[in-house]
Image (spheres, grey):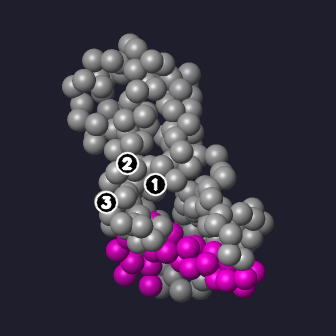
Amino acid sequence: MTKDRLIHLCADICYQEDESSFSELYNHFFPGLFSFAQSIIDDKFKAEEIIEDVFVKLWESKKMLPTITNLSHYLYIAVKHGCLNAVTRRKTTEELMPSADFQYKLLSTGDFIIEKENLAKINQAIEDLPEKCRLIFRLVKSEGLKYKEVAQLLDISVKTVDAQMYIAIQKIIATLKITLPEFSHYYRKKNISSL
């Protein structure tokens, strides 16, 4: 979703109480928030409930939407706190790791079009990343969060986020060089941080 579209949706929700815009916003953010929630609390139903609670509160306080500078970060922080509160209530001490399937949509940046088969290979390369690495990659590349924001969400250092992103990109490039050799010239020309 483009930044302009997001601003337009927020304005429609705030000033016109447009429920279809709110549904579009929910549908856009839900998959990523659900994956993130499951990385904290390994309970699909509870994760869904927490996300729904966050969106109910967002609807109830929709007049403040224009004041939120980074809605994605705001939603992830709200879901994080909801999950941590749920974990505290359950009084569990075990660490829960991500278990959801991640989808990452790569936009065409050149004159070529990525066919479904190639997109599946790219998604598989992302799926094959270690769980923590995959979560960080998704938060940065798919959700557009800054390294500092990801570090705050996951309670890790910015250096750890940077290192995990480097590992993720290196592994993805290594896989794609094998599975998509026809684009090998592209990997050499592009800076890996632009992936």
Residue 68 appearing in the image: yes
In the image, 148: left or right of 33?
left
Q: Distance between the residues labelled 2 and 1?
A: 7 Å
Mark number displayed over residue 136: 1
Q: What residue type is labelled 1?
A: Ile
The mark nearer the N terminus, 2 or 1, is 1
Quadrant of the rendered structure where residue 19 is? bottom right
Residue 67 position, x and y percent, is: 37, 81
Residue situated in front as seen by the camera: 87 or 71:
87
Residue 28 position, x and y percent, is: 55, 57
Instruction: Name the residue: 52% across, 82% down.
Output: 62
Residue situated in front as seen by the camera: 124 or 96:
96
Residue situated in front as seen by the camera: 186 or 159:
159
Instruction: Name the residue: 38% across, 39% down.
Output: 169
Label 2 Cα neighbours within 10 Å, binned few <14 / some 14-19 / many ≥20: many
Instruction: Name the residue: 51% across, 69% down.
Output: 76
Q: In this view, does 61 lie above or below 19?
A: below
Residue situated in front as seen by the camera: 52 or 41:
41
Residue 59 appearing in the image: no
Label 1 Cα neighbours within 10 Å, binned few <14 / some 14-19 / many ≥20: many
Q: Distance between the residues labelled 3 and 2?
A: 10 Å
Q: Mark 2 points at which residue?
A: 165
Label 3 Cα neighbours within 10 Å, binned few <14 / some 14-19 / many ≥20: few
Q: Are marks 2 and 1 in contact (CB under 8 Å)?
A: yes
Q: Which amino acid does label 2 sit on?
A: Met
In the image, 20: left or right of 63?
right
Q: Which amino acid does label 3 sit on?
A: Lys
Magenta residues (range)? 64-91
Q: Is residue 66 magenta?
A: yes
Q: Name the residue under label 3.
A: 159
Quadrant that contains the C terminus: top left
The mark nearer the N terminus, 3 or 2, is 3
